[in-house]
Amino acid sequence: MPHRGLAELSEPLAWAEPYRTKMVEAIPMTTREERKRFIAAAGYNPFRLRADQVSIDLLTDSGTAAMSDTQWSALMQGDESYAGSRSFARLQEAVAEVLGFPYVLPTHQGRAAENVLFHTLVQPGQIVPNNMHFDTTKAHVHNRRARPVNLVIPEGRDPQKPHPFKGNMDVDALEALLEKEGANVALVMLTVTCNNNGGQPVSMENIRSVSRVARRHGVPLFLDAARFAENAYFIKQREPGYRDVPLCDIVREMMGYADGCTMSAKKDGLVNIGGFVAFRDEELYRRASQFGILYEGFLTYGGLSGRDMEALAAGLREVLDEHYLAARTGQVRYLWEQLDALGIPLVTPVGGHGVYVDAGRFLPHFRHDDFPGWALSVALYEEAGVRACEIGTVLAGRNPETGEHDYPEQELLRLAIPRRVYSYRHMDVVAEGLRRVWQRREELPAYRFVYEPPVLRHFTATFAPEPIAAPASRSTHPAG
Ligand code: F0G
């Protein structure tokens, strides 16, 4: 029997991935004793594990996609000229065709696009509203001595609340902010899909409304387009009136409301490295160009080689294949359904690029500063060799003004699924690993910092486990 998600698809071929394997990569196999040693030696930080100590790597869906034969052959056509590269022209054409933006500055990845854009538009003391800033976006706003503000709708802050578009921005809150601080708002951003609350999509209606409000106040709107194709697929599936609209038209409409976008091409660009910032307006592009040249490289390569730009141009087109997106979102949903059936608390509904476990509810006796998502990530690695990523207090970092932990609204563990890499059977292994952790959840230790770096601390911090009293003997304090 196909699982629930698949049974909805009438065409049997749609049950399967629309690609087959031409080359394989061996998966490292380890024992539980080895994994316990490896993670202890890594300072209980999954980011510090060696990849050959990990069997199923769900740390991120960023830069981890399998490229297609089309993309691999495009690499061979890379034009490595410093200026006027033909590969840049191909990238520019793909960006114009797929996203509708005529001007593009290639960057080495998404955060570099943020750096270039924010140097162009953000002045110290200004405010940048977003549905939810991704951590690098937030860090780059801070780096400009400006203030990031998250204006996601209330449903988007509650892992349990059902809503088809939990990435939506609270338009009234944006309106109020612009009324009060209009002159001080540098730009408005919308992250599609919204990574930090579960890969939740933003509806077309919301993009349209946000655009209208921003425009009325004369403030530019940029999309963080890292997962634009997955967002478009959700619009097609979940938003009335879009079922029969081709995905390419949905994407063009989404982008049509914006003045430009930043792109981490390591996600929906289907490449292992790359990014860009794209603009509709030539004057803005000109202003940004000087920062592009300063921080990334000349206009026609930015932070990329010619072959990178070729692979990206091909990836931008491939990612809008509806069969691919059905298989992609279907696989994420398959894992979500298995974990849900076990009673494991999850961010609901399922998002686009991964399953987010509600660590706050998984470990309700943990406080925020016991790092529940972190504890789960270590336990899952020890149990099944699966590497996942905390999206909680550790990742959120400290408030630069107060020095206190910048407690997030949700304590999550993200199981991010690389594109076109793992099989459904691998998802079964992940589910079984988490089932076993769920069974012994009252035994998991808390974690304390041994070394805490000042910025983006999750990447390099080290920790020590600390036993924590079982729920019955501890005054409970919901982490979520
Ligand atoms: N915006 C979003 C929504 C992202 O998810 C990321 C990266 C970036 C910007 C920055 O892009 O990594 O290319 O510099 N997200 C990765 C992740 C790291 O694991 O979710 P980058």
Image (cartoon, rainbow, N blue to C red):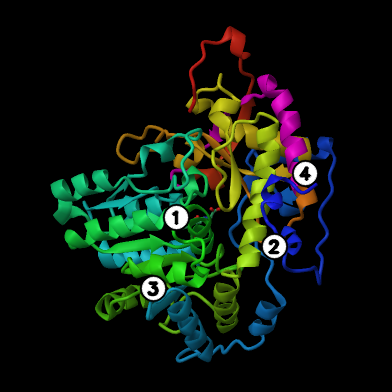
Across and down, in percent, residue 376 comes to: 64, 33
* Mark closer to the chain start, 3 or 2: 3
Instruction: Check the image and name the residue furthest to the top.
Output: 473
Residue highlighted by disc 3: 278
Q: Look at the image and say whether residue 112 sits in the magenta stretch.
A: no
Q: How many badges with numbers are in the image?
A: 4
Residue, x 18% and y 60% (percent of image)? 216
Q: Look at the image and say whether residue 449 sits in the magenta stretch.
A: yes
Are discs 3 and 2 less than 8 Å apart at CB?
no
Q: Amino acid at mark 2?
A: Arg
Q: Viewer-nearest of labels 4 and 1?
A: 1
Are discs 2 and 1 less than 8 Å apart at CB?
no
Q: Amino acid at mark 3?
A: Ala
Residue highlighted by disc 1: 240
Q: Secondary structure at mark 3?
A: strand
Are discs 4 and 1 less than 8 Å apart at CB?
no
* Mark closer to the chain start, 1 or 3: 1
**CA neighbours of label 4 inside 10 A, class few (<14), some (14 to 19), many (20+):** some
**Number of the label disc, if any, that sits on residue 428:** 4
Residue highlighted by disc 2: 420
Q: Amino acid at mark 4?
A: Asp
Q: CA distance from mark 2 to mark 1?
A: 29 Å
